[in-house]
Image (cartoon, grey):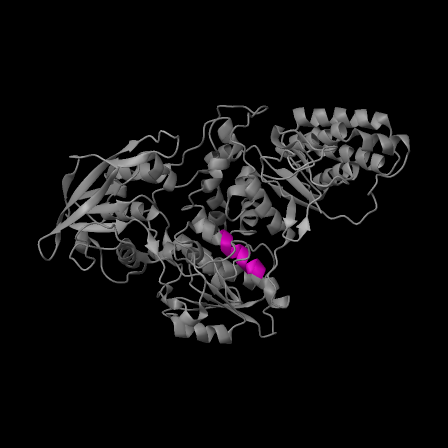
Amino acid sequence: MSAVVFSTWQGEFIDNRQKFGDELPESGFKLPAEYTADTKSKAFIGWDGVAIFDDDIDAVRLATEYAAQYQEYSEACGRCAPGRWGGRILYDMLDKIARGEGSFADIEHLREISQTMMLTSKCEIGRTVPKPILDLIEHYKGQFDTCILEQKKSKHYEDDIDYIAKVTAPCMDVCPAHVDIPAYIEGVRDLQFSESLAATRQTMPLAHTCGRVCPHPCEDACRRANLDEPISIMELKRLGADYETDHGLAWLHPQEPKPLRNDGKKVAIIGAGPAGLTAAYYLALEGIKVDIFEDLPVNGGEVAVGVPEYRMPIAKYQKDIDLVLELEAVSIYNNHRVDANRLKELDTEYDVVMLGFGARLSKKVRADNENPDMGGYWGAISMLDKVNLWHKYDIGSPVSNELKDKKVVCVGGGFTSMDVVRCSIREGAEKVTMLYRRDEKTIIRNTTYEEYHESVEEGVEFVFHSSIREIIDDGENITKLIVDTFELVPDPDGGRPQLVKIEGGDFELECDYLIPAVSQSLDTQILPEEWDIKMTSWNSILTNGKDFMTSRDGLFAAGDCEYGPMTIVNAVGQAKRVASVISRYLYNGGKCTLTDDEIMEDHLNKLRVYNKKETITGWMPGLPREVSEKLGVEERKTSNKEVNFGFTGEEAVAEAERCMRCYYISMVAI
């Protein structure tokens, strides 16, 4: 809820002007009434209306400044006259009125141009910019009339007011890394793959990786889904990166890497996974010295040793890693375990330490007679480590030595459990079963439809609404499991349905290997006790979720260690923000600050850019989503070849052309 003077946001109409008292209606939306903790907003204006927080707002200048952003950001594609020229006319007419030189004919012209843009512009930015301007013209008519009748400037035309704008899109907003998705899709559409990659690398260095194993939350917020099906956003991302490496091109960085600074300042990063690599990359682009300390003999963290080759070929991931490690400012030290004593040393040797280690301790399933030392009990992380170290690096021995012709049971419902069961198939297990407490719909939401569908094709058996009650062994090895089954019982009060055990519904399940993949926890022994680092209720490192500083000055955290087990794109998004904050912390007297762009990111994320209930018009519906070719099931089951071949050129262009280019402009006046 937000206190407002006036609001038309998303169809909500609130007018508290001339009203007094404590019971004034508030907005139901999380509007940015406070820009920061110590700075109040005067107004917020965007694609779906306007919200005024200050009675003394200059509505004429607000409309003028908003129209100016259309020129400033130049996001109009220029492929239609209303979009290309309409915005310029809006600004010229509004500024003319704000200068005290306008006429009522200009108002009529503004209305006419606005309606034309909203009806005929080919991209959303051209359709939506006029909407809040029309709201201001209608509901703050008196201010416009005064400027025209008295031929004087709007009341705050020359005052020092900050107007802070940000361009976003529904897909960009929910992407944890805030990748400029419409831009990289447009690059594919125009066969400008380097431009596509350049747009991605602004906030995402691991383009090969997140073009293959991202859970793509962006697709859940694709406006195309309101019309037919979402764009295949993730698969289009890999094209720019594959083009770069397949053609042997020089690294395309979002900026020319700055020379290594000679001021002696340096940053230590613990962990060479997605979070550590991302933070190192953006710090090194600024010429800041970064040393990464990695416990494993290989680089890449859990993506390297946890995500199987058939999903994320190591040759492709290695290109993302090389992009980072070949920067002059980055050094890495493998087989370097950082414990509490070593962390204290690094804390004194470096200006900043960033914790980016993963959650690599498998949790128990909490069944009777559960003994991790029993034969056949194998934690998911340990099992996947062995699989991937062998297949990717020729380290160790094949897991088929253990699993061939065995009955494997995995407990879980996320990406790790999917990797376990699909790897077990490939290692020759006789039967592979996944037990999951929830339903099919939930497991798809936790992972992706593709992951679930492909695992079923490969022969994995899923038993939903189930959990292990007891583990049976012969004194040395696990032999079978006693499994309880449940049913979902609706909550009479309308809450979440509850799982209720089905009496007599239990059954026995033969089992040679039980592999828990219910979740992972952190090894927090790395943290010195005397530092008394504040932790969350789920035992991850507490930060404020904005600048990612821990309770200890100069110690930052990102990725799994800050949030708990998270996706790659979440880790990348956090680490990009951390790198930005650290770069200013080092050269701003040890103060943590956010840029206006980052502050606006947080506001928009709270507000939610995507409107699932929106009715889409003006676009051709029923254009089918392209589906890339997959490796055949029988070949998949006996190899670690990449399953997803990716789009052909024709498929990629056809899919990119489905994008509606849903850029929006938002702006706060402070």
**Residue 383 percent location from the top left of the image:** 26, 55
Q: In this view, does 265 lie above or below 508?
A: below
Report whether 236 appears left or right of 471. Answer: right
Camera sees residue 115: yes
**Residue 386 percent location from the top left of the image:** 27, 58
Report whether 373 appears left or right of 67. Answer: left
Residue lying at the far right in this picture: please name it. 150
Residue lying at the far front in this picture: please name it. 21
Q: Which residue is drawn at 50% across and 76% down?
A: 349
Answer with the quarter of the image where residue 378 lies. Answer: bottom left
In reply to whether residue 579 is colored magenta, the answer given is yes
- Assign the magenta stretch its main secondary structure: helix
Camera sees residue 184: no
Q: Is residue 329 above or below residue 403?
A: below
Which quarter of the image is occupied by the N terminus?
Answer: top right
Residue lying at the far left in this picture: please name it. 474
**Residue 354 percent location from the top left of the image:** 48, 64
In reply to whether residue 320 is colored magenta, the answer given is no
Report whether 282 appears left or right of 242. Answer: right
Q: How many labels does the image show?
A: 0
The front one of 366 and 419 is 366
Q: In this view, does 239 lie above or below 355?
A: above
Answer with the quarter of the image where residue 54 lies. Answer: top right
The front one of 274 and 373 is 373
**Residue 274 percent location from the top left of the image:** 44, 56
Report whether 559 appears left or right of 9. Answer: left
| Residue range of the region highlighted in magenta in the rendering | 573-581
